[in-house]
Image: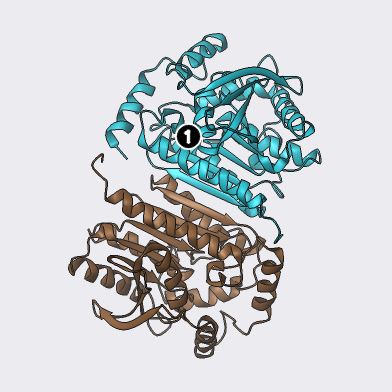
Chain colours: A cyan, B brown
Amino acid sequence: MSRQQRQALDEMLRHGPLDLGGEVAQQRALFHDMMTSIPLPSDVKTTEGELGGVPVVTVETSATDPAAVLLYLHGGAYVIGSAADAAGLAAEVSRRTGARAVCVDYRLAPEHPFPAAVDDALAVYRALLDDGTPSSAIAFVGESAGGGLVAATLVAAKDAGLPQPASATVFSPWVDLTVSGDSATSKTAVDASLTPEGLRTRARDYLGTTDPTTPHVSPVFADLTGLAPLFIQVGSYEILLDDAVRLAARAAEHDVHVELQVWPEVPHVFQAFAALLDEGAAALDAAGAFIRARWADDADTSGE
Amino acid sequence: MSRQQRQALDEMLRHGPLDLGGEVAQQRALFHDMMTSIPLPSDVKTTEGELGGVPVVTVETSATDPAAVLLYLHGGAYVIGSAADAAGLAAEVSRRTGARAVCVDYRLAPEHPFPAAVDDALAVYRALLDDGTPSSAIAFVGESAGGGLVAATLVAAKDAGLPQPASATVFSPWVDLTVSGDSATSKTAVDASLTPEGLRTRARDYLGTTDPTTPHVSPVFADLTGLAPLFIQVGSYEILLDDAVRLAARAAEHDVHVELQVWPEVPHVFQAFAALLDEGAAALDAAGAFIRARWADDADTSGE
């Protein structure tokens, strides 16, 4: 892995105009520009639609197998981002798993605070199940706030009596809206993308009057017993490092199969920069292998 | 993975005669009988020898490539166990990596307290390097106390100015001799092998007058900056669960590449029971893949 690549990306992020804690409409536009600055590969097809009353963008590649689905939840601190903005990264996961990605346009704060996002993600999952997709053919994937929303939706699905999907994969998940992990201070200098103040601003937008320790808001405080196998990736140059570590610790304590990968000296959701950074592509390969292995496990459950 | 297999193993361990905190000579004999109760596969060859003045047992399989070496550190709470006792598990790692395993018969407590074990492990590593084996062709592997000793030896190697090996893989590592992780209480009922009291007894044997928070004793308190990529596996039915999680957290904080796998509802060093438990073989496959990938990385470091 190239130190030069990491330094170039760090410079790019530090000098970019994105400020997660900034004015909402402006940051939404900037985020959209950033996430769509690289055109989608020519074999990627996106289709707008609706599932369970929620708008979605379905992302397919030439290798997509109709039997399996990724339920994909985008990042953006619950306030910015969109299903279309996530299409590039979702396509890379789709390509490595052979499954189409259903990217959910869950409602955003501050217009729609908690529990709108969880309600929308759960509604799409329920619609997939109601349409006849077996839970064992569905994998949840999400990045940043979308990773937190993946974990929250797994808990919400359990609480609603729905089956768990085959697996859940989260990139740099934000799972503690109290923003109280050690890395929120210890990694501030090396995090080129996020600030604790920015996260706290967006947490207030999402929470409204809700307690930040609510399990469906901050899954690091939830009972994770019975959750699907979890795959967690994070960079070590992130103020959210401890969110990933504590999610793994909590899942372990609750007897969930969990795998945590910490990639040194790379930034928040470094997988989105796979075109610029060897670690991004390698991490996506590992995530794809985990998702595929879980589908294979489910196809052979005679020993359970 | 089979619940029936897990339950049978749990019964076997709970009704077995091993008591880690028991009388030393008796427990050494019982541990030897348990670890050698299954004969080595016919293609496994063991050779007694010496490296750096320390006795070793070299374990080879038919697939062994002479270019690569596993430096293997056995378990037994620093007081029981031997290189020969570890041959069965070392052979399974050897088979999956194509490398011979050099199992170190480091001196045991209470006869030889800290730092005898670290000194011996480091002496063997230094002898391998002095013999012309490049550090990039060496992987450290260890289980239980041997996993703690792997981490301690990585730190000791750094402190001695030696290069790091290509990778380090630890199964259920004991890295906190203060025995203060949450799982030391929360997982007592489900741990079929170990008790906090047993660990504390053996910690006293190993420590003598040494402070248990000494970094070369309890690597969870060490500066891990610059360490080789770490691969950590642990069962969720272990009082040592938090040792594994905290080692991963510490390594992450210090910008080390670290991967943690938590396997639900399986016991301490479940990889040793691969013949009885699907999870054991699957975990060994994952460890072998990690070790091989690190060698491949080192062969292609042009981008560094």
**Residue drawn where x is 44% and y is 66% of the image:** B147
Residue B289 sits above or below residue A58 on the image: below
The chain to which mark 1 is attached is A
Confirm whether residue A49 shows in the render: yes
x, y (%) of residue A275? 38, 28
**Residue drawn where x is 70% and y is 39% of the image:** A154
Confirm whether residue B228 shows in the render: no
Residue that carries the numbered disc 1 in the rendered image: A239
Report whether A282 appears left or right of B127: right
x, y (%) of residue B105? 36, 79
Report whether A287 appears left or right of B155: right
**Residue drawn where x is 52% and y is 10% of the image:** A29
Report whether A89 appears left or right of A275: right
x, y (%) of residue A38? 42, 18
Q: Dividing the picture into quarters, in which one does residue A178 lie?
A: top right
Q: Dividing the picture into quarters, in which one does residue B8 lie?
A: bottom right
x, y (%) of residue A264? 39, 42
Furthest residue toward right: A161
Tag 1 secondary structure: loop
Q: Dividing the picture into quarters, in which one does residue B141 lie?
A: bottom left
For the image shown, how many numbered marks are present on the structure?
A: 1
Q: Residues within 10 Å of mark 1 (few under 14, many from 20)?
A: many
Amino acid type, callout 1: Ile
The quarter of the rendered structure image containing the C terminus of chain A is bottom right
Q: Nearer the viewer, residue A61 or B255?
A: A61
Residue B27 sits above or below residue B75 on the image: below
The quarter of the rendered structure image containing the N terminus of chain A is top left
Q: Nearer the viewer, residue B267 or B296?
A: B296
**Residue drawn where x is 51% and y is 45% of the image:** A289
Residue B241 sits above or below residue A130 on the image: below
Q: Nearer the viewer, residue B195 or B92?
A: B92
